[in-house]
Image (cartoon, helix red, strand yellow):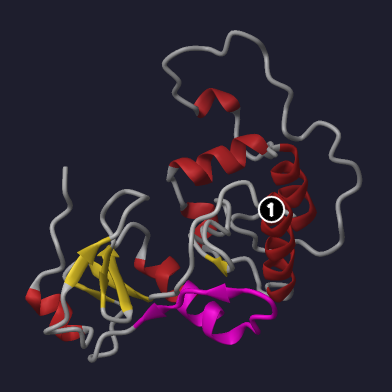
Amino acid sequence: MPSQSPPPAVLLAFGAAGDPAAQLEGGQGSAWRVGDLVLKPLDLSELELDWQAQVFTSISCDGFRVARPLRAQGGSLVVDGWCAWEAIEGRHEERRWTEVIAVGGRFHAALVGVPRPDFIARRTDPWAVGDRVAWGEAPRRRLRTRQAPATPRRSTRAGRGPEPAHPRRPHGQRAVRRAPPASHHRPLSLLAPYVIRLRDRDR
């Protein structure tokens, strides 16, 4: 079902009034390209959005790009339930796993020293719950599944080896779906080498 386009008041607040709105493919189908902006209904907490705006503005992007959240003319990040992001040009290319891992590593390196945000512990979205269960921070019985898997799956925690000294704030989804921006950032409290290792195994 098509998503409703951003209302005129939202476009005006983000300085995009008069520009044509084009619905973007992929994802949940709720994102719209308007001039140099991408607008979509807010799908995370305002606290997390504000954290992303601060962190993405402060980090040095060496060999990758990030789409930064943008503020409306009044300074707010959210207007009538909508938020805006920088539009970054790119293209979708499949199976570029080596580059995905390399860009992810550079992105993780840029986040060294960024403290763990408090909202991670309070999130209840499926990504956050799966993160906690996979890494032994929550019991598996909290997951609601329609059907048990036919064969037992090896725990993600198995064979992790010694933990590195510097936890980082990696992304919960594959960061590079367009070349070469790092997008769809959903921070998790993981250790970057494990994220890269799991992604490498998924090839």
Q: Position of residue 165 (x, y in %)?
A: 86, 62
**Image position of 193 with respect to 159: above or below:** below
**Image position of 198 with respect to 45: above or below:** above
Q: Nearer the viewer, residue 142 or 125?
A: 125
Region in magenta: 52-70
Which quadrant of the rendered structure holds the C terminus? top right
Residue found at x 54% / y 64%: 118
Residue 143 placement, left or right of 64? left
Residue 39 placement, left or right of 203? left
Q: Position of residue 47 (x, y in %)?
A: 41, 69
Most extreme residue toward the top, as rendered? 150
**Image position of 144 with respect to 201: above or below:** above
**Image position of 172 with respect to 69: above or below:** above
Residue pointed to by mark 1? 190
Say whether residue 145 is magenta: no
Q: Nearer the viewer, residue 11 or 114?
A: 11
Q: Position of residue 52 (x, y in %)?
A: 49, 73
Most extreme residue toward the left, as rendered? 8
Residue 188 placement, left or right of 29? right
Residue found at x 50% / y 44%: 127
Q: Quadrant of residue 14?
A: bottom left
Most extreme residue toward the right, as rendered? 162
Which quadrant of the rendered structure holds the N terminus? top left
Mark 1: give few (<14), some (14-19) or many (20+) Cα within 10 Å: some
